[in-house]
Image: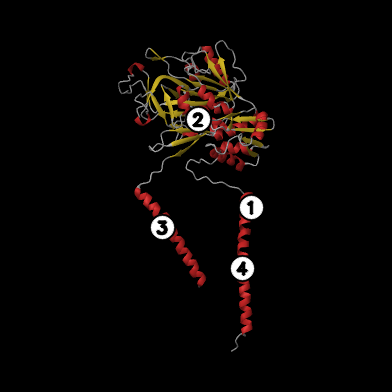
């Protein structure tokens, strides 16, 4: 039996020691190389994940489609200070756009700290800066989206609108409604197309007015759609033979007086010829009767019955007051305009009529219904604010339909039918009241925006419903505080100590 010489054992030990040292030295280098490779791959193949229940950090399908269609670079100049409360949310949204396409270039310019650069951009884009109470300069717009010589301003109220529903500490929640995506995507579409969408609102019959300072003013709706490049125009239909060609859509919003047969025919013929029309027709009550609007006969020819009846809701969960004629709608059809509202949408209506589809070919799509317990009262004299309403034999059984949509078939004599214009009929116009449009709890603004978007063929107004971030107070009991203290002050240090002892014993071995 032979044994190794001491010199051989020593050489082997030295070689093993050298290998251990090389291994110890190479391990950090390999870790650095792996980290660099992972970062490089992450940079080349960037991906974001959104695990929030409301998909708050995910762009809508419409925004992604618009960004995919970009063939040129879009410059987004952001004039927000990092100290502003809305900066973090706006920055998060802008990063989503930049992550979705390489054509979106972000430029952050603080009007206060980068005054010279802001001055040059202010002259270029026609914006200005004011001084707030703290003495800091603040731009009158939040951002400007530019492509070549075209640009579109994004206002501050289009980014983040806080809504305090209660004081902190009393169990109330704070809601922040983010409208930034609709504003930014709309701005990108506008600099790509450059043409304003013209919406013509009829006048002369007591409709909702485009003027400010009147009782039934569309000011809130105009403000809400301002960043979407909607241009409004008053339209007198009395005595007219045609609808102006520059009207992308026509809206008849809550007339208090009936239109003439000639006016009704003019508007419906406009739809048959390819025009787009919104009819929001409240039940106007005189002497306990719902008076005619002038559209009844024309709509019946299209398969829509405009009922002379008042919708009453008996489901207590849908009522916000004791008045059964004022209620919340939560049941929506699978139409492009109402699909986004099917799961959590709430639309408030007041003094609405029923609108019933009577066409047998399925061309009329239902947009909104009241609950199973609702019905439409035809004898208005039987409605009393002091008594529980009851359904009579002549009343319309629920669930009552309040809004329908159709794409009218236009055909010449002897020619095959083809799709004409788009038509929406809703038995209420009060849903465009300012407080209802501005409420974070209701989807009235999204409904109005979606109607206009579908009629004017502006998908961005339909597909980007406002998202809400809800944050509430976290309340700890005394037991919760002791449990948190035990975990932080005892378990975490104990775990670190045990891990350190285990490592030390492993090295000793």
Q: Nearer the viewer, mark 1 or mark 4?
A: 4
User: Residue 40, which numbered label?
Assistant: 1
Say few, some or many: other residues with alpha carbon within 10 Å of mark 4 (under 14 / 14 to 19 / 20 or more).
few
Q: Mark 3 to mark 1: distance in Å?
A: 40 Å
Q: Nearer the viewer, mark 4 or mark 2?
A: 4
Question: Label 4, on which residue?
Answer: 23
Q: Nearer the viewer, mark 2 or mark 1?
A: 1
Query: Where does residue 247 sit, x and y in percent of width and height?
Result: 60, 20
> Helix or strand or loop: what does disc 3 sit on?
helix
**Among numbered discs 4 and 3, the one appearing first in the sequence:** 4
**Among numbered discs 4 and 2, the one appearing first in the sequence:** 4
* Quadrant location of the N terminus in the rendered image: bottom right
Query: Where does residue 236 sit, x and y in percent of width and height?
Result: 56, 13
Residue located farthest toward the left when viewing the structure as drawn: 387
Say whether marks 3 and 1 touch (CB < 8 Å): no
Question: Label 2, on which residue?
Answer: 446
- Residue 457 appears in view: no
Q: Mark 3 to mark 2: distance in Å?
A: 51 Å
**Among numbered discs 1 and 4, the one appearing first in the sequence:** 4
Q: Residue at x 49, y 28 (%)?
A: 445
> Helix or strand or loop: what does disc 1 sit on?
helix
Question: Label 3, on which residue?
Answer: 490
Q: Quadrant of residue 415?
A: top right
- Residue 277 appears in view: yes
**Among numbered discs 3 and 2, the one appearing first in the sequence:** 2
> Helix or strand or loop: what does disc 2 sit on?
helix
Say whether marks 2 and 1 touch (CB < 8 Å): no
Say few, some or many: other residues with alpha carbon within 10 Å of mark 1 (under 14 / 14 to 19 / 20 or more).
few
Say whether marks 1 and 4 touch (CB < 8 Å): no
**Among numbered discs 2 and 1, the one appearing first in the sequence:** 1
> Residue 258 or 230: which is nearer the viewer?
230
Q: Residue at x 60, y 48 (%)?
A: 46
């Amino acid at each position: 039996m032979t044994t190794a010489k001491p010199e051989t054992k020593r050489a082997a030990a030295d070689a093993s020691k050298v290998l251990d040292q090389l291994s110890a030295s190479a391990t950090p280098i390999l870790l650095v190389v792996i980290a660099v490779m992972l970062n490089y791959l992450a940079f080349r193949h960037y991906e974001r994940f959104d695990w929030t229940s409301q998909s708050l950090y995910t762009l809508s399908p419409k925004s992604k489609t618009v960004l995919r269609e970009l063939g040129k670079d879009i410059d987004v100049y952001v004039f927000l200070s990092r100290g502003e409360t809305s900066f973090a949310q706006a920055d998060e949204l802008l990063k989503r756009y930049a992550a979705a396409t390489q054509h979106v270039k972000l430029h952050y310019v603080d009007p206060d700290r980068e005054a010279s650069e802001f001055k040059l951009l202010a002259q270029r884009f026609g914006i200005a800066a004011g001084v707030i109470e703290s003495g800091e300069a603040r731009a009158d717009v939040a951002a400007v989206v530019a492509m070549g010589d075209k640009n579109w301003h994004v206002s501050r109220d289009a980014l983040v609108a806080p809504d305090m529903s209660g004081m902190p500490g009393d169990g109330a929640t704070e809601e922040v409604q983010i409208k930034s995506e609709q504003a930014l995507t709309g701005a990108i579409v506008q600099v790509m197309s450059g043409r304003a969408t013209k919406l013509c609102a009829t006048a002369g019959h007591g409709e909702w007015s485009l003027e400010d300072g009147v009782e039934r003013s569309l000011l809130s709706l105009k403000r809400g759609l301002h960043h979407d490049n909607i241009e409004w125009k008053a339209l007198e239909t009395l005595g007219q033979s045609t609808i102006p060609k520059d009207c992308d859509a026509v809206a008849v919003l809550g007339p208090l007086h009936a239109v003439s047969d000639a006016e009704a025919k003019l508007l419906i013929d406009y739809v048959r010829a390819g025009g787009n029309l919104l009819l929001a027709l409240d039940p106007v009550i005189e002497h306990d009767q719902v008076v005619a609007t002038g559209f009844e006969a024309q709509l019946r020819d299209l398969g829509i019955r405009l009922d002379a009846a008042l919708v009453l809701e008996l489901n207590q969960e849908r009522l916000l007051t004791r008045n059964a004629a004022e209620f919340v709608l939560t049941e929506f059809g699978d139409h492009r305009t109402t699909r986004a509202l099917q799961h959590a949408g709430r639309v408030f209506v007041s003094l609405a009529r029923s609108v019933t589809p009577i066409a047998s070919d399925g061309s009329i799509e239902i947009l909104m219904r009241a609950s199973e317990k609702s019905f439409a009262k035809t004898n208005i004299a039987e409605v009393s604010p002091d008594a529980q309403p009851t359904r009579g034999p002549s009343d319309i059984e629920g669930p009552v339909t309040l809004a329908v949509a159709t794409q009218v078939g236009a055909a010449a004599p002897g020619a095959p039918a083809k799709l004409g214009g788009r038509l929406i009929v809703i038995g209420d116009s009060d849903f465009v009241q300012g407080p209802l449009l501005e409420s974070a709890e209701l989807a009235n603004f999204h409904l109005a925006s979606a109607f206009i978007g579908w009629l004017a063929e502006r998908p961005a107004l339909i597909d980007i419903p406002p998202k809400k971030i809800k944050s509430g107070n976290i309340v700890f009991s005394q037991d919760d505080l002791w449990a948190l203290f035990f975990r932080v002050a005892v378990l975490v240090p104990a775990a670190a100590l045990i891990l350190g002892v285990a490592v030390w014993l492993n090295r000793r071995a």
